[in-house]
Amino acid sequence: MRSVRRRSGARSFQGDDGLWSNCPAGGDSTMHITRRHLVAGAAAVAGVSAVKAQSLKVTSAQDLGPFYPIVRPADHDADLTRLKGSREVAIGQPIQVIGRIVDVGGQPISGATVDLWQANAVGRYDHPGDRANPAALDAHFQGFARLSSDQDGEFRFRSIKPAAYDTPIGTRTPHIHFAIDGLTERLVTQMYFPGEALNSSDPILNRAEHRAGLIAEAIDRLSADPQALAFRWTIVLVSG
């Protein structure tokens, strides 16, 4: 900016945008604001507003279901395909799931407790309430895990892809149950698999407020475990 004119004790300034404006005599030219500055300032404010508007959608709550373990199994680590002390492995298609817990602003939530439980490869839960199910139990399938999110909000587990099964309210598409306890809130929900034909008719999935957020993303198989299908899923809490 430069001052080149004088009129009645006032100075006129030409800004970087080529526009002229006046400053009263004795005024401080360093406080002069050009149109370009105003536009830039408005753009910055708009940018902040846009970021705030892009809050993530909170993961929809889902039914706990009747098969949460009555007694927590002694073996509840991140590998559900093998019981401690056994060389046998569970029947079915192995899967790797990489989960991440964040708040609506995308900040990771560390130290959250993650309980997960599921049916086995033929659609049977290891639970007294599922005894009427004609499908067979798998003596080598753990079926439940209790994990904790790390400093990046992540948790991982290896399991078997669960099968669909019939219920009084309709056929359930393959899914895994979750109960997440953050520092200030609890979320009970379910994770589903992409591309399943039964997703379109599942009675629980299709009443979710944010259905898309419950379906995991298929990713490339992990180099360390090429036999397992791999999925990524983000859980969004309000504040953690």
Image (spheres, rainbow, N blue to C red):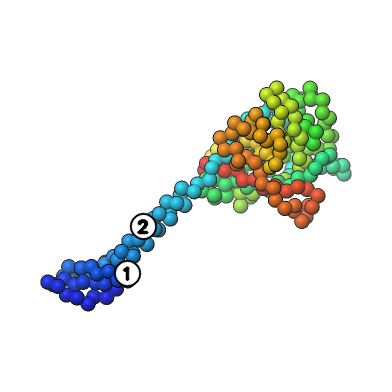
The answer to whether one can see residue 65 in this image is yes
Q: Position of residue 171 (x, y in %)?
A: 71, 28
Q: Amino acid at mark 1?
A: Asp
The answer to whether one can see residue 146 in this image is no
Residue extending furthest right?
87
Q: Position of residue 38 (x, y in %)?
A: 32, 61
* Contact check, label 2 and label 1, Cβ < 8 Å: no
Q: Which mark is residue 17?
A: 1
Task: Identify the residue at image location x=62%, y=35%.
Answer: 189
Figure check: 14 above or below 70: below
- The residue closer to the viewer here, 124 or 204, is 204
Task: Identify the residue at image location x=23%, y=68%.
Answer: 21
**Disc 2 or 1, which lies upstream in sequence?**
1
Q: Position of residue 149 (x, y in %)?
A: 64, 47
Q: Nearer the viewer, mark 2 or mark 1?
A: 1
Residue extending furthest left?
8
Q: Between marks 2 and 1, how big is the CA–CA gap?
A: 16 Å
Disc 1 element: loop
Q: Amino acid at mark 2?
A: Ala
- Quarter of the image for the C terminus: give it: top right
Query: Label 2: which residue?
Result: 42
Q: Position of residue 205 (x, y in %)?
A: 63, 33
Task: Identify the residue at image location x=84%, y=39%.
Answer: 91
